Amino acid sequence: MKHLKYIQFAILALCLFALSSCTTPKKISDGTGETRWPDFLREWAVDYEINDSQRVSLISLIDSVYYFFEDSTQPVEAHSGQVCRMVDRVADVIANDSVFEFTLMMRAAMSNFLWYASHDDRFYQCDCSGESLSRFVEWQIVSSTDVELMCYTIIPTSWQAPWHFANIIFTMAKDDEVPLATFVITNYENFQMDSVQITFYDSLDNVLDVVPENDVYVDSSNVSNGVKTVVMPPKYMMLALSQSLFVEVSYKTTEGWYYMKGSPGATFVEQINDCPRLKNVLDQITLSRER
């Protein structure tokens, strides 16, 4: 897995930093000055009632890493191990944690950290700098005899992630012939999501395909609470992800169009190997196209 990730690193780095250009390590609070990202993260954890010692300790570790980067006089040799421990623990949460709210927080945390640290030369002296970006774009995998699940969360800038995100989800039970493929799109800011579009891009940011919500089934029964579910044709979805790098979700709100973009295609083909039933479906699709 690591070999492929390092090959993709250069492309992903350029693209992600371009996509995250409006992300900053500090957010201006209304009349209260600047808020550090770790403090924002702690407030977010309180809102989600995340207070167990293991998860709280990870937030504290993130805080200590930010303090290192905030002090330009600190030598990287004394803190490289700490930075890499943080990257490992955050990536492990993104891939494996059973509490979705915390995985969302850590995906946003990794996004914020990568943008922030990329502006400091000391980051590139850390042993984990080369693989940290590719770990940020991993899917969460659940594979058992009864069910297989792959989930990837697209977020906008890190500061907006508590209110705007979209989950791409494949689920397949042991008796299913094809998986269920959905986009669960959330707007907790103003609860408005009209004219949803899903756009697929290649590694050069060229548009490969656009799927408007009128072309697929959409469950809007929970839209008043800020959630809309787009059910995608599973075989189309698998093929689109295997051929693209970026996926963008956009919709109209009361304030105009809203966009968020992620890189689920970066590791999809590789990680689907951990889900044998899903992999078999993708193999059948690929073989049918080659004939």
Image (tube, helix red, strand yellow):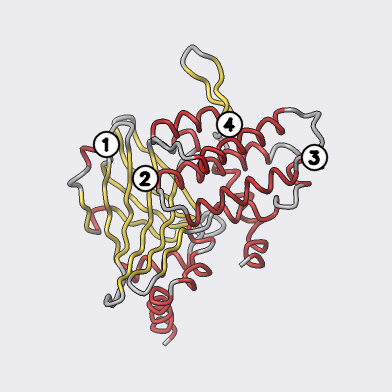
Sequence-first disc among 1 and 3: 3
Task: Look at the numbered discs 2 and 3 and tell me whether their residues touch, using CB distance below 8 Å.
Answer: no
Q: Residue at x 55, y 15 (%)?
A: 33
Viewer-proximal residue among 4 and 83: 83
The residue that disc 4 covers is 24
Q: How many numbered marks have been drawn onto this rendered protein structure?
A: 4
> Is 133 located above or below residue 164 in the figure?
below
> What's the distance in space between the residues labelled 1 and 3, CA to CA?
48 Å
Instruction: Give residue 250's mark.
Output: 2
The residue that disc 1 covers is 192
Q: Residue at x 33, y 57 (%)?
A: 211
Sequence-first disc among 1 and 4: 4
Name the side, left or right, on which 271 lies relative to 3. Answer: left
> What's the distance in space between the residues labelled 2 and 3, CA to CA?
43 Å
Sequence-first disc among 2 and 3: 3
Q: Name the amino acid, label 3.
A: Ala
SS at badge 1:
loop
Write down the quadrant of residue 247 in the picture.
bottom left
> What's the distance in space between the residues labelled 1 and 2, CA to CA?
12 Å
Please state the horizontal and vertical placement of residue 233, each as a whole percent of the image: 29, 66
Mark 2 vs mark 3: give the one in front: 3
SS at badge 3:
helix
Please state the horizontal and vertical placement of residue 179, each as a whole percent of the image: 31, 70
Q: Name the amino acid, label 1.
A: Gln
SS at badge 2:
strand
> What's the distance in space between the residues labelled 1 and 4, CA to CA?
26 Å
Q: Name the amino acid, label 2.
A: Ser
Task: Look at the numbered discs 1 and 4 and tell me whether their residues touch, using CB distance below 8 Å.
Answer: no
Mark 1 vs mark 2: give the one in front: 1
Instruction: Give residue 78's mark.
Output: 3
Sequence-first disc among 1 and 2: 1
